[in-house]
Image (cartoon, coloured by chain):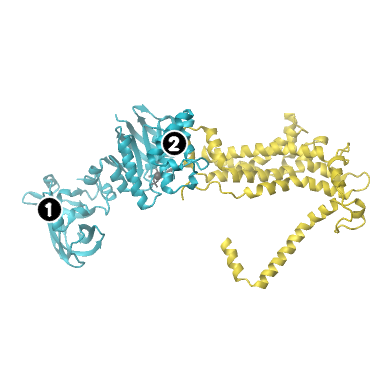
Chain colours: A cyan, B yellow
Amino acid sequence: MGFLDIKSVTKSYGPVEVLHRVDISAEEGEFLVLVGPSGCGKSTLLNMIAGLEEITTGEIAIKGQTMNGVHPSKRNIAMVFQSYALYPNMTVGQNITFGLEMHGVPKPEREKAMSDVASLLQIEQLLDRKPGHLSGGQRQRVAMGRALVRNPDVFLFDEPLSNLDAKLRVDMRTEIKKLHQKLGTTIVYVTHDQIEAMTLSTRIAVMNGGYVQQLGTPKEIYDDPANVFVASFMGSPSMNLIPARVVDQNGEPHAKIRLEGGKTAQLRFSDPGLAAHSGREVLLGIRPEAITDPEGADRKSGNIQTLHNVVDVTEPAGSDTFVTTTISGKTCIARMRADTDVRAGAEVAFAVNMDKAVVFDPETEKRL
Amino acid sequence: MAAATQDSAVRTGRVTRMLIYLVLLLFALFYMLPLYVMLVNSVKPLDEITGGGMMSLPAQWTLEPWLKAWSTAQIGVQPTGLRPYFWNSISMVVPAVAISTVLGALNGYVLTKWRFRGDTILFGLMLFACFIPFQIVLIPMAAVLGTLGLAGSTAGLVLVHVVYGVGFTTLYFRNYYAVFPTELVRAAQIDGAGFFQIFWRILLPSSGPIAVVSVIWQFTNIWNDFLFGASFASGDGAPMTVALNNLVQSSTGVKEYNVHFAGAILAALPTLLVYIVAGRYFVRGLMAGSVKG
Ligand SMILES: Nc1ncnc2c1ncn2[C@@H]1O[C@H](COP(=O)(O)OP(=O)(O)OP(=O)(O)O)[C@@H](O)[C@H]1O
Ligand SMILES: [Mg+2]
């Protein structure tokens, strides 16, 4: 039993079930990110934790106490909304203290809590302004201040950064992370941005179509995706998924792939257990950064396999150059050093880090 | 809108524009004519009017007709002028407008932020109330007022106008609150505000523009109502409109047109005043900035 327990929770709107038996448990102080494409049920789940949506079946508990039927204001949670939801008729100060006022906290204490939060978030100079006269980033801060001042057990964030411009988003991301490290409060954070999920979280729940596809640390999610959806949703550019056949050579399993000009290549798997699938068609998953130029290959890897293939396109991105090539009829992206001398149309060497390769069943799309 | 008018204004020639303004001016004058006639004749002695000078300015200015209309004209049995009926109207209009506006706001709040099964049907039925002609409800309403013991009283008239107006005010507030961000209500719920606190502290302070619309609409309708007033209020309890009618229709002696004109203006004054005072709050966007753009 954790600090926040979501046990077999489902949600239906009329006959339509939008969340199917979700089981998530978070420890105290965890930064849990719910990530997934639009409409997968992230907000619905978060709203159920907040008590804003009823739970159809199952149970949600905080600190071992069931929250089913408990009013949102009695759950000791605080929420930051996507639209910030600042009360337009109140000043920033009143916005921040409104919750305390509703909970009957005496005025001097409210003032103290407000000035503490204001100095933590550096919004002291904004306290007398109305939300209409703030910039997006300032509103974001005020919305966080309103949540912080309650000193809740759990913070709930629903896409809090999606309305900021790219630069500010990165800044605020760092700030939220710092805040979490400083306060150590449990956070549930909804986003559809996989980079936000990776950078902020201690654990990620990847959701799709109302199912939790995988729950794990960012590293587990990234390196050990449970299925094709998780593999391709997390990471940018997304993982290369190459049709391949598992073949046995000298008693070791290899991935047999087709290259340009009718050639084939065989890449030895690092995991000898894959020999069990010998003869089978699979999807070979390799992230772009695991396909490099030979000089840029990971020295710590114990299994770098090299293949030669024709380059389709090169895309210099400043820090790296993305190189596109066709393997087994699929477009693959390799991530090479910025100064590699690679031209479109030339045949070059690609170093594949097979330690990082994962294999999926093409039918079920599950990990093998 | 503004861009379009400007655009066409640029392309239209100078002469055409002058012509348009001229026509508009003529229309404006034409529409102002009745008010002019009323004003001018209300400050003339009666013989100037009967002498045939309807359009001319008074040769002799006098406030006598106004004073007479207000305090001494014969209406009903007593020569009381319109004054007591004016207060009748005020004591009917103020509570009726206030109650129907508050009820409309509450209905709009519930229908948009506390949705329940069948809420759209309920709203549809309330909308229906806006389209029922007055005449249809006269007899049932009289029966209801009789049962409640409110027949012929100002309280009864207030009830009638509230019932009749609540459909409109609900429509206004529901449409206004429908675009009011629900996240604000949810945030307030998490903050621990209850049903009425959310209404009072979050929604109402942002409802200025629609409240003004509702008040103006209700005020003019209730103040100008004749049918309900004539049907449900008797004698001394009659509202201004009924009293004005009695004043004009009184068949004893000569028709004092100047007094009638003054009385008519007195009866119209409050609605004019409401427009002048509140009209400019009509389009004020109080919601700016609640949701970031
Ligand atoms: N009131 C409702 N009635 C019926 N279906 C609903 C209702 N609210 C949400 N849904 C459905 O539930 C599903 C999940 O919605 P939800 O808002 O949780 O998605 P989300 O993951 O937050 O997406 P986004 O990233 O776009 O915010 C969607 O398919 C949506 O259509
Ligand atoms: Mg959402």
Residue at x 19%, y 48% (from the top left corner): A358
Question: Is B207 placed left or right of B64 in the picture?
Answer: left
Image position of A63 with respect to A296: above or below: above
- Nearer to me, A46 or A246: A46
Place of residue A311 in the rendered image (x, y in percent of width and height, measured from the top left): 20, 64
Instruction: Label 1, secondary structure: give it.
Output: strand
Q: Amino acid at mark 1?
A: Ile
Residue at x 39%, y 38% (from the top left corner): A119
Question: Is A221 placed left or right of A110 in the picture?
Answer: left
Q: Quadrant of ligand 1?
A: top left
Q: Residue furthest right?
A: B253
Image position of B293 with respect to A148: above or below: below
Label 1 vs label 2: CA separation? 51 Å
Place of residue A325 in the rendered image (x, y in percent of width and height, measured from the top left): 21, 61
Quarter-of-image position of residue A190: top left
Instruction: Label 2, secondary structure: give it.
Output: loop
Residue at x 43%, y 32% (from the top left corner): A112
In terms of sequence position, does the residue under pointer 1 or pointer 2 come before the other?
2
Place of residue B200 in the rendered image (x, y in percent of width and height, measured from the top left): 56, 36
Q: Amino acid at mark 2?
A: Leu
Are the residues tagged 1 and 2 within 8 Å (C-beta)? no
- Can you see residue A211? no
Q: Chain of mark 2?
A: A
The count of marks equals 2
Residue at mark 2:
A52
Residue at mark 1:
A304
Question: Is B279 placed left or right of A320 in the picture?
Answer: right
Give residue A133's mark: none
Have a look at marks 1 and 2 and say if they share a chain: yes
Place of residue A202 in the rendered image (x, y in percent of width and height, measured from the top left): 27, 39
- In which quadrant of the rendered image does the N terminus of chain A lie? top left
- Nearer to me, A258 or A153: A153
